Amino acid sequence: MKRELCAAMARRFQELGVKPELEAFQTGDVLFANQLVEEGLIDGVPMYQFVLGVKWGAPANPETVMYMKNLIKPANAIWTAMGIARDEFSIAAQSIRLGGHVRVGLEDNLYLDRGVFATNGTLVEHAVRIISDLGCEPATSQDARNMLKLRNAEHAE
């Protein structure tokens, strides 16, 4: 059922011109997403999102990030790895080190530090510091739209 439903959703996304996020909680999800790409059900460069540290999913550690990254096809796919809760920033750093991107937000983590509640803004600010400290430059929202080749990207903002 999963395959048929996801394929139908992918075809609908294509009809609507929507860029899907290929979210992977375990390695089999990456392989399934690769199959959708190979079947032509994902337009343009695919965007993979590894969700790590969820119970019964892939663990949030550097080995998992590297392994999942090496599974994606095509090799030029856009990807990011994110860790749940206390693993958010360590996995963000690992993602950057391996050439990926960063996702942070209250959906994944409520705290900036132990006992310090976060806002989406403070999480993003902390992620920007990590990206900069690792010698990279954070993308603007327009950069991200262009990278993902989103429809009307040149007219956004």
Image (cartoon, rainbow, N blue to C red):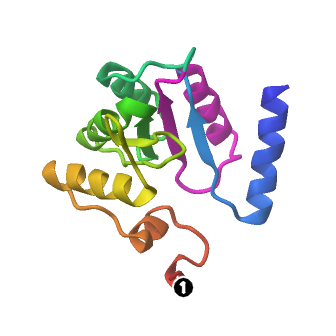
Identity of the residue drawn at 64% across and 51% down: 20
Of residue 107 and residue 70, the one placed in the foreground of this image is 107
List the single residue furthest toward the top.
Answer: 56
Drawn side of residue 6 relative to residue 132, left or right: right
Q: Position of residue 87 (x, y in %)?
A: 36, 30
Q: Where is residue 137 in the image (x, y as percent from the top left)?
A: 23, 61
Residue type pointed to by label 1: His
Of residue 9 and residue 54, the one placed in the foreground of this image is 54
Which residue in the structure is indicated by mark 1? Answer: 155
Asked if residue 101 lies in the magenta stretch, the reply is no
Q: Position of residue 72 (x, y in %)?
A: 48, 34
Asked if residue 50 lies in the magenta stretch, the reply is yes
Identity of the residue drawn at 14% across and 51% down: 133
Q: Give the range drawn in magenta.
A: 27-54
Drawn side of residue 109 relative to residue 123, left or right: right
- The reply to whether residue 73 is visible in this rendering is no
- Number of numbered discs present? 1
List the single residue furthest toward the front.
Answer: 115
Of residue 14 and residue 90, the one placed in the foreground of this image is 90
Q: Quadrant of the N terminus?
A: top right
Place residue 30 in its image quadrant.
top right
Callout 1: SS = helix
